[in-house]
Image (cartoon, helix red, strand yellow):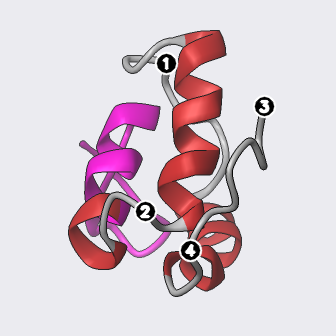
Amino acid sequence: MRNDEQGNECPATLGEYRDLCAALGGEECRAVAFLDAKIEDQGRDEKVMSADSQMRAILMPMIIEKAKPGEFE
């Protein structure tokens, strides 16, 4: 874990963001598919350099949508 802009703990790696998104939206959501594609290229333990607010802005809308097959390949 790392700290966000307000000092709260937030995910530090692609894998941690993936686990959070899977817990909130389920394994079939677009956010998980998006992160799985990134993890395939960069690895689960890849550190996230973007601010947590940016990650939330990208991932949260994707949590409520189901992924389409091959969407992020």
**Alpha-carbon neighbours of circle 1 within 10 Å: few (<14), some, or many (≥20)?**
some
Circle 2 SS class: loop
Residue 25 lies, in percent from the top left, at 35, 76
Q: Earlier in the sequence, mark 2 or mark 3?
A: 2
Q: Earlier in the sequence, mark 3 or mark 4?
A: 4
The foreground one among 28 and 44 is 28
The foreground one among 5 and 41 is 41
For residue 2, above or below residue 64:
above
Circle 3 SS class: loop
Residue 30 lies, in percent from the top left, at 59, 64
Per the image, the residue denoted by label 2 is 28
What's the distance in space between the residues labelled 2 and 1, CA to CA?
22 Å
The foreground one among 56 and 2 is 56
Residues at badges 2 and 3 in contact (C-beta under 8 Å)? Answer: no
Q: Amino acid at mark 2?
A: Glu
Residues at badges 3 and 4 in contact (C-beta under 8 Å)? Answer: no
Residues in magenta?
1-21
Per the image, the residue denoted by label 4 is 66
**Alpha-carbon neighbours of circle 3 within 10 Å: few (<14), some, or many (≥20)?**
few
Residue 37 lies, in percent from the top left, at 63, 31
Q: Amino acid at mark 1?
A: Glu
Q: Is residue 13 visible in the rendered structure shown here?
A: no
Per the image, the residue denoted by label 1 is 46
Residue occupying image coordinates x 67% and y 77%: 57
Q: Amino acid at mark 4?
A: Lys
